[in-house]
Image (cartoon, helix red, strand yellow):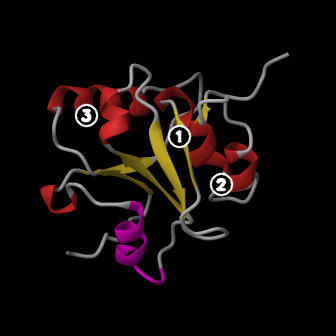
């Protein structure tokens, strides 16, 4: 299997090709600005990565990757009504994951690369179903 490319922006990797419309919907939701914020990401939709498991993914990330995490659009993201994208840590606890709804991806993408927040702060703030839907407002 080919190596996952090192990208300038955070990578959104597609690993399920069963629903092109859901993929397009998720991509559009990720790119939609939230106020003045947006997720700065690169999308990779390459059938060579179809069915990629978490373990395989870890072995395919370049050793000197500039990204400390990756977004993964897998089967669950395509079929779940909220389209929760898988987020995988590549730095602190490689392989640790949680899910995030597309409208909250900007917060992760804007904060993790600059060290403003840690992976665990988001992972530990998921709902009981393991999905990050934002921090409580109030």
Position above or below: 55 against 121: below
Residue 6, labelled with which disc?
none
Pick the front one: 65 or 133: 133
How crowded pointer 1 is (Cα within 10 Å; few <14, some 14-19, many 20+) is rated as many
Query: Is residue 56 found inside the magenta-colored segment of the image?
Result: yes
Write down the residue under mark 2: 112
Q: Residue furthest top?
A: 138
Pick the front one: 115 or 87: 87
At 51% from the left edge and 30% from the top edge, which residue is drawn?
101
Residue 111: percent from the left, percent from the top? 67, 49
The reply to whether the C-beta atoms of the residues labelled 3 and 2 are less than 8 Å apart is: no
Residue 99, labelled with which disc?
1
At 38% from the left edge and 65% from the top edge, which residue is drawn?
7
Label 2 SS: loop
Position above or below: 110 against 102: below
Q: Disc 1 to disc 2, how far (Cα)?
A: 15 Å
Magenta-highlighted residues: 54-64
Label 3 SS: helix
Q: Main secondary structure of the magenta part?
A: helix
Give the number of the mark in front: 3 or 2: 3
Q: Disc 3 to disc 1, how far (Cα)?
A: 16 Å
Tell me, yes or no, if residue 27 can be seen here: no
Write down the residue under mark 3: 23
Quadrant where the N terminus sits is bottom left
Sequence-first disc among 3 and 2: 3
Sequence-first disc among 1 and 2: 1
């Amino acid at each position: 299997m080919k190596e996952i490319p090192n990208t300038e922006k955070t990578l959104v990797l597609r690993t399920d090709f069963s629903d092109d419309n859901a993929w397009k919907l998720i991509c559009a939701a990720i790119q939609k600005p939230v106020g003045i914020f947006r997720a700065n990401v690169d999308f990779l939709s390459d059938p060579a990565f179809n069915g990629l498991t978490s373990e395989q993914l870890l072995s395919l990330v370049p050793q000197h990757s500039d990204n400390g995490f990756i977004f993964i659009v897998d089967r669950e993201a395509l079929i779940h009504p909220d389209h929760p994208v898988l987020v995988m840590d590549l730095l602190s606890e490689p392989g640790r994951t949680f899910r995030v709804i597309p409208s909250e991806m900007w917060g992760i993408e804007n904060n993790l690369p600059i060290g403003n927040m840690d992976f665990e702060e988001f992972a530990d703030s998921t709902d009981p179903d393991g999905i990050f839907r934002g921090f409580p407002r109030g």
